[in-house]
Image (tube, rainbow, N blue to C red):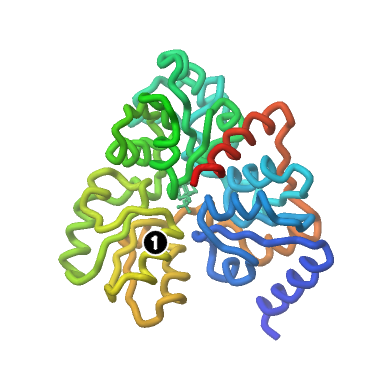
Amino acid sequence: MSDSEQLRDKIFALKEKKNAIILAHNYQREEVQDIADYRGDSLELSRLAATTDCDVIVFCGVHFMAESASILSPDKTVLLPEISAGCPMADMIAAGSARKARTQFPGFEYREEFTYPAEFSLKDIKKLHPGAPVVSYVNTTAEVKAESDICCTSANGVKVVESLESDTVISVPDKNLSAWIAKNTKKKIISWDGFCHVHERATATDVESSREEHPDALILAHPECRMEVLELADHVTSTSGMLRYAEKSDAQEFIIGTETGLLYKLRKDNPAKTFYPLRKDMVCPNMKKTSLTSVLHCLETETYKIKVPEEIRVPAKKALDRMLEVK
Ligand code: 13P
Ligand code: SF4
């Protein structure tokens, strides 16, 4: 038996013993996706975390995802196999303090591209636009969710904004998702200045050169990409939206404008179709931290437990629940 087969057997045995469920985001390593009970985008995984009847949730993803699971299922033990697996975009906004002072993971630096000052927080932008509801992307800390009216994911951003009565909406933290929402609604969107360093890498030049190389391919792009990419794409959707679109489409070739981890499932589900990454370097290092070894360690030692204090969890849950109610 190979090392990875042995690891898998141990994981499955412990999972059963502890009545655990393993959730994996679509960007996880192939071997981690393979041992998961469910794999999906942020919205699907949030829905699963809210309804599962297991005792332990092992979240193979990044910190904010495990935090959302804990917010939605406070009685369950929520485990994140790699505690340093954060999302840099989530650290680009803080609830009430300067963003530099409130980052969950080391290494955050103020960048020239930001339009709001380093001292600015979500509370400051709320003060500038009194009465405007805040839509926070799930890629945020629990504290930011607690300061928000409703959450959204890449799959439901436009619907969430449309569900609000107000004509002006604050959207945090992703400037690209906010711009995409603004393009698809009549409401006025006040955007924060964050971005995903992985998706931000792709440019219009990448789209043009991939089209030249693969003229018959359709281009699918994640709304975290720059507007110049989204405008040239054939379809803009979440990670699981891309899986569904590729399966239904009659096209045979696709250029995928998101983190390259999605290509594994796309190819597995559609063996007769061909998938190319928009850029080979669209790799999220934090999503790749989780391995079979860390999943086993996490089940053996029940680390790292993710628990949100009640005073933050309760308002954060309101924002997530409100999102889950949007059809
Ligand atoms: P999805 O919700 O589309 O899976 O995206 C999550 C994410 O972190 C994208 O970078
Ligand atoms: Fe965060 Fe980007 Fe990684 Fe998604 S791909 S987890 S947005 S850094």
- Viewport quadrant of the N terminus: bottom right
Taking the view exactly as shown, the residue that stands out farthest to the bottom is: 1
Above or below residue 4? Residue 51 is above
Position in image of residue 15 (x %, y %): 77, 66
Above or below residue 238? Residue 264 is below
State which quadrant residue 226 falls in. top left
What residue sits 51% from the left and 41% below the top?
139
What residue sits 71% from the left and 43% below the top?
306
What residue sits 69% from the left and 56% below the top?
58
Can I make out residue 67 in this image?
yes
Position in image of residue 251 (x %, y %): 27, 73
Q: Nearer the viewer, residue 176 or 291?
A: 176
Q: Callout 1: few (<14), some (14-19), or many (20+) C-alpha neighbours within 10 Å?
A: many
| Total number of numbered discs in the rendering | 1
Q: Which kind of residue does numbered mark 1 sit on? A: Met
Can I make out residue 106 in this image?
no
Position in image of residue 236 (x %, y %): 32, 53
Taking the view exactly as shown, the residue that stands out farthest to the right is: 17
Mark 1 lies on residue = 242
What residue sits 49% from the left and 23% below the top?
122
Position in image of residue 294 (x %, y %): 68, 60
Q: Is the CB atom of the residue marked by disc 1 within 8 angstroms of ligand 1's nearest atom?
A: no
Q: Nearer the viewer, residue 129 or 161?
A: 161
Q: Is residue 114 left or right of residue 25?
A: left
Kindly state the secondary structure of the residue where label 1 is placed: helix
State which quadrant residue 143 falls in. top right
